[in-house]
Amino acid sequence: MSEMPKTELPAPKRSYLRPPERRRQLLDATTAVVRRDGLTALTMVAVAAEAGVSRRLVYNHFPDLATLARTFVADRLMTFMADTESEFNSEARSRSAAARSIFVRLSA
């Protein structure tokens, strides 16, 4: 009998990211999970799947779900504050228009 040639798929390339870049990737994945599925769906497994990494890698950067959640909330608040500050500092927009824009984002 003729033997079928074995076809092997190449192993997926693992990308090495420095710790700050990896944390950013994981926080971005956390944001995607929360936006899509809600905060109650946030798990280490969901973040790992979204980021395309192992659960162990997520735990290497965040020792538990509470730490990940606190870091996520702090990151989102810092982003919101930076965006808000730029809205108010923009000379092209009136302060009332900036305030309306901020309230719209808060209610979303």
Image: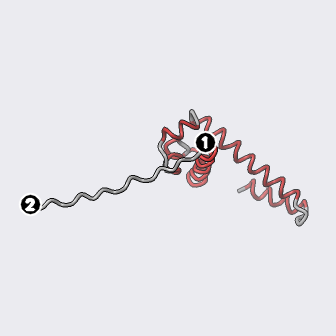
Q: Residue reaching furthest bottom?
A: 92
The quadrant of the picture occupied by the C terminus is: bottom right
Q: Which mark is residue 93?
A: none
At label 1, counting other C-alpha atoms closer than 10 Å, the crowd grade (few under 14, some 14-19, many 20 or more) is few
Task: Please state, as top left, top right, bottom left or bottom right, where the N terminus lies in the image.
Answer: bottom left
Q: Amino acid at mark 2?
A: Met
Numbered marks: total: 2
Q: Earlier in the sequence, mark 2 or mark 1?
A: 2
Q: Residue at x 58, y 36 (%)?
A: 62
In what element is the residue under mark 1? helix
Q: Which residue is mark 1?
A: 19
User: In the figure, is residue 63 to the left or right of 54?
Assistant: right
| Dot 2: element | loop
The residue lying furthest to the top in this view is 63
Question: Can you give x and y, in whole percent of width and height, for residue 53 in the image?
Answer: 49, 47
The residue depicted at 80 percent of the width and 60 percent of the height is 101
The residue sitting at 60% across, 44% down in the picture is: 18
Q: Amino acid at mark 1?
A: Pro
User: Could you tell me residue 2's position as x and y percent?
Assistant: 12, 62
Q: Position of residue 50 (x, y in %)?
A: 52, 51
| In-image side of 107 versus 30 (left or right) | right
Of residues 82 and 1, which is closer to you in this image?
1
Lateral position of residue 97 relative to residue 4, left or right: right
Q: CA distance from mark 2 to mark 1?
A: 53 Å
Task: Give the x, y percent position of residue 67.
Answer: 62, 35
From what the image shows, is residue 56 above or below residue 6?
above
- Mark 2 and mark 1 residues within 8 Å of each other at the beta carbon: no
Above or below for 102 versus 19: below
Q: Residues within 10 Å of mark 2 (few under 14, many from 20)?
A: few
- Residue most extreme to the left: 1
> Residue at the spot x=79%, y=56% of the render?
103
Residue tagged by mark 2?
1
